Amino acid sequence: MYFFKNDKNKEDIINELLNLGIYKKGNYHLFELSVDELLQEYEQQLKNNEHYE
């Protein structure tokens, strides 16, 4: 399921990433990223997980 800016706030997206085991992106903690960056990372993780299923 993909989220759009209006559906989820920053905290919700961070929680989804934490549930996937993602705590940082590069040298940045998730709370330091913008909503757009968080959404990009979330969508990338979903795509990566589809390859393993």
Image (cartoon, helix red, strand yellow):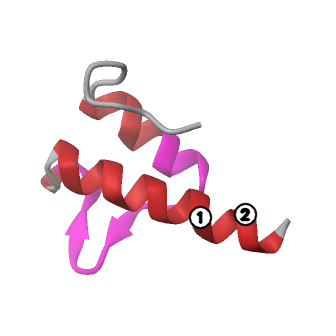
- Cα separation, mark 2 vs mark 1, equals 5 Å
Place residue 10 in its image quadrant.
Answer: top left
Q: Which residue is mark 2?
A: 50
Q: Residues within 10 Å of mark 1 (few under 14, many from 20)?
A: few
Along the line of sight, which residue is nearer the eye, 12 or 52? 52
On screen, residue 28 above or below 41: below
Residue 40, magenta (yes or no): no
Q: Could you tell me if the residues under marks 2 and 1 are in contact, i.e. CB atoms within 8 Å?
A: yes
Q: Which residue is mark 1?
A: 47
Location of residue 52 (image quadrant): bottom right
Is residue 18 within the magenta segment? Answer: yes
Report x, y in % for residue 49.
Answer: 69, 65
Asked whether, in this view, residue 24 is left or right of residue 31, the answer is right
Magenta extent: 16-31
- For badge 1, the amino acid type reads Lys
List the single residue furthest toward the top.
7
Q: Does residue 21 sit above or below 7 in this rendering?
A: below
Residue 21 visible, this angle: no
**Residue at 53% across / 63% down in the picture?**
45
Q: Amino acid at mark 2?
A: Glu
Q: Pointer 2: residues within 10 angstroms few (<14), some, or many (20+)?
A: few
Residue lying at 39% horizontally and 29% vertically, measured from the top left? 12
Q: Please state which of residues 51 and 13 is positioned toward the viewer in this rendering.
A: 51
The quadrant of the rendering that contains the N terminus is top right
